[in-house]
Image (cartoon, rainbow, N blue to C red):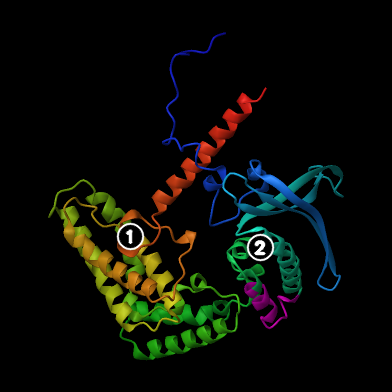
Amino acid sequence: MAMPYPHRSVRPLYPEIPDTVCDCALLPNDYPTLPEELIHTTLIHAQALELALDEGRKHAHWRIEIRHCTTCDQWWWAESSQRTDITYARDSDPPVAVGAVHVTLGMAVRCGDHAEAEALTDWWGKYQDAITRRDRLASAGDGGDVQRCIDLGNTSAATRQLSESTARTFNLSRDARARHERDLRQYIDTLERNPEDADAWQALQRVQARCALARSWDAAIEPQDWTIEEWWTPALAGVRRLEFDIYAVRNAARGKALDSPEHQALRRIEDTIAERWEAHCGRVAWPSPAVAFHALLAHAKSLEPMVVRGDMASWRHPDAVGRRLRALLQSGAVEITRHMAVPAWLATRTGLPDGHEYQQQRNAAKYWLEVRRARRASAQP
């Protein structure tokens, strides 16, 4: 049976990327890709890598490949390993094995040249040995084993992509906040009811200082790991409730005119949140500039200017937060990562990646990469 409407052409989802752009350019730059995505490259070297890790306590093996793209002269390093998962009959007691599933896992990263690709194989062995030792010593170690993993992961741009994002094991169970959570919550609850309670504020500061000291002992701590309780001040009393209520107020104000009752209600709650955050920023002792950046970034993402058309006053607080973020970026204390993609209005004011634009670029690259390969496959005899 003939397909309906054969004369109609399918409109592509994204503008076509010319064939002069190599397939390598359509693969991600800031995180690893899959080895099977490198079918357009030439295999230069392959080897089986068998390692005895953690002084022989564990053995593992990988397939290592070094590939080269003759079109754009890009070098690639790839690793893959196989895993077998046993499947069992449902509700069997004792368990009865009924089959096995063989899975191949791997990742590939870009390299500056052939020498860097070869060096990654040696680095991979050292890194696997380090994280194996770290896993064994995580519960009793002093953090030195964790720091070695982090140092190895920061060797180069390629190793940062291949290494674990936080180099932590089961959150290391050394989470400082877990030991002080009850005290933090107790004093914050007291200050939520009475922000002028000086004794509770001093007690909260002492607990926050103990948290900061314990955090400093954890070699794997990252700025986003800090919780709001660890840098909370009485200036934020009531803000959590306001940030919850504002969603309904925003929805009620959408499409309304300036100075309408709905707009005035939104203006009041936005101004109250802004005043309390400005007071907080003038009072808080941030654990570090990086912690301040991540806290302010999370707050900025919760803002939504111009809910009501023409409400220019809604930009005052977002612009103030944007200036603080931009100052922290310019200080060099913060490193931009792909996880910091933000709304377009915030990207314009801070220089951070535009989340929507970034996602559209990746979607277009993936779309046309698949179309290209389908065309090549259909053209083969």
Taking the magenta stretch, the answer to whether it contains residue 144 is yes
**Where is residue 154 shown, x and y percent of the image?**
60, 71
The residue located at (45%, 65%) in the rendering is: 336
Residue lying at 78% horizontally and 50% vertically, measured from the top left: 82
Q: Is residue 231 shown left or right of residue 310?
A: right
Report the residue that reaches farthest toward the top.
1
Quadrant of the snapshot with the N terminus: top right
Is residue 378 found left or right of 204 in the rendered image?
right
| Residue 224 placement (x, y as % from top left) | 49, 70
Quadrant where the C terminus lies?
A: top right
Residue 110 x, y percent position in the rendering: 61, 55
The CA span between labels 2 and 1 is 37 Å
In magenta stretch: residue 287: no
Q: Amino acid at mark 1?
A: Leu
Is residue 265 shown left or right of residue 211? left
Between marks 2 and 1 in the image, the one whose residue lies nearer the viewer: 2
Crowd band around label 1 with a 10 angstrom C-alpha radius: few (<14), some (14–19), many (20+): many
Kindly indicate the quadrant of the structure image that contains residue 128: bottom right
Relative depth, front residue between 173 and 310: 310
Residue 346 circle label = 1
Crowding at dot 2, Cα within 10 Å, few <14 / some 14-19 / many 20+, comes out as some
| Residue, disc 2 | 116
In the image, the segment drawn in magenta is: 137-151
Question: Residue at 52% across / 83% down in the picture?
Answer: 211
Which quadrant of the structure image shows residue 277?
A: bottom left
Give the structural element (helix, strand or loop) at label 2: helix
